[in-house]
Amino acid sequence: MNISGIRVDHFGVWDDLKIDDLSRDINVFYGPNEAGKSTLMQFVRAVLFGFSADRVDRFITGPLRRSRGRVGGSLRLSTHEGEFHIARFGNELLNSESPDELRVTTLDGARAGTYRLEGLLSGVDEAVFQNVFAIGLDEIQQLSTLSDTQAAQFLYSLSTGADRVSLVDVMRQLRAGRERLVGNEQQAGVLCQMFDRRNKYARKIESLADQTQQWAELKSASRKLGEEAERLEQRRHQLESKVRSAEIAVRMRPKWEKRQQAIAAIAALGTVRDLPEGLLGRLEAIAPRIEQREKELEDLRRRRDELTRQADQIPVRESLTRHAARIGALNDQRKWIGSLDDSFLKLTSQIEETEFEMQAEQERLGIVTRNDESGASLGREIITALRDPARQLRRSKQQLEEAKRQASKYTSEAERLKSEIAQKLGKEVEWLDFKEGNAVADAVEKVGSVASDVRRQVELGRVVTELKGQLEELTKHRSQLLESQFLPRPVVIAL
């Protein structure tokens, strides 16, 4: 870096000073005392490193201060990157507490950052610049107050020092640093320790390299196992999906078959007619009927349960139930048996009346009936007169005999039925007494009562069966009514 131009707006004794085309080799500024040579050197320091408190007191706020112009100026620097203008101006208060204004621009006027100044100075601070590149009268005057040895050391430091450190100190520090790095006979240096650590780490790296190879192999195997596990997991998901699909298909197969049957039935129906208008109103009107049907259905259920309970409470033996048909047939002949009993009683009464009339007629005629006397002793007229009554008497006797035979036959039949019923029931039927005149009728009536109970039980069973049928019918009708409230299945399928 070279200073190729100086421009001072106002600094110390200088105002509007402009120096251009400075040589890259050497430039000499000379003049009488207080001409401003040291002031120009301090200006260069101020532009490069700022307005220090000493410079502010000496060159700006001191007796040389002037009220005109801005305090500061600029330098033109030539570098291998090109030319730069470094301008620095003091603050308005002209004190050391407020920062000054620094501006770095290129040759074409483009503004660069202030960090460019540090790069242009290559890291040289103000102390190094003052001791090496800008020695002033203050440093020279210090020589007069020093002894020869001190002056020699000062001059040696000024000529060979770097960054406020003498070369002797630097050599001493380098020697100590060398011993610290390389070491001596008593103690190993840092380099030896570092070499040992290097060898140790090299061995460790080799071990880790082997482990890395093993890790890579394990990683590859793990990746393959992971891929295989992922493939097996996908296969498991696929199999589970197929199993679920198969289970669903098995569960849905009956419904699917019903659906296919329904589709076939719908196809057999042909074209589906349009829904008639007012269908929703009709469905709403049917809803109360459905509720009424449900109530009736509930009543029928209760009635069925009651009849079932009553039928269960009827004490009927199984043997009597098995002969219910024959008992019913006997009950159906009850009127006929009663009519025979009435005919028997009527014929008996007629016989008694006929015998009484014959006795009265014989007494009136004076005929004495004797067993040893036959009809031969009677006269022809009497015989003729008695022929018709005798004929009637003979017919009556025949009828009486026939009635007695019928009565005996029916009595035998009744006795047989009595014994058969007793045998079937497993006990003696005490209520069948044929010794009285109306025994047959009473027995038939009692048997009819038993048959009536049997028929009532059978009838109750039939009623229960009918009620069950009605219940199923009502349930089916209710389901049809509920289904009719929705759209027809062909329409739903079409939608």
Image (spheres, helix red, strand yellow):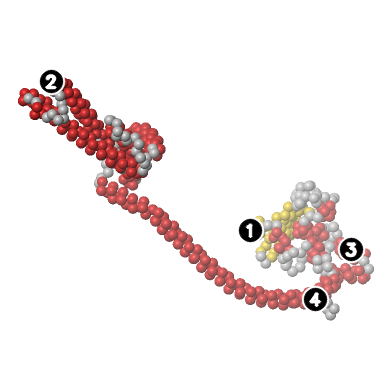
- For mark 1, give the secondary structure: loop
The quadrant in which the C terminus is found is: top left
Instruction: Note whether residue 22 is visible.
Output: no
Instruction: Give the crowd class for mark 1: few <14, some 14-19, many >=20 residues within 10 Å.
Output: few
Mark 4 = which residue? 189
Q: Nearer the viewer, residue 408 or 173?
A: 408
Q: Residue at x 70, y 55 (%)?
A: 103
State the mark number for residue 365: 2
Mark 1 = which residue? 108
Residue sticking out furthest to the front? 372
Instruction: Give the crowd class for mark 3: few <14, some 14-19, many >=20 residues within 10 Å.
Output: few
Q: x and y percent of residue 303 in the render?
A: 38, 35
Q: x and y percent of residue 484 in the render?
A: 33, 39
Which callout, 4 or 3, points at the residue further toward the start of the chain? 3
The answer for how far apart the CA atoms under marks 4 and 1 are is 55 Å
State the mark number for residue 141: 3
Residue sticking out furthest to the top? 364
Say which quarter of the image contains residue 314.
top left
- For mark 3, give the secondary structure: helix
Name the kind of residue labelled 4 in the image: Gly
Q: Nearer the viewer, residue 54 or 256?
A: 256
Report if the CB atoms under discs 4 and 1 are less than 8 Å apart.
no
Which callout, 1 or 3, points at the residue further toward the start of the chain? 1
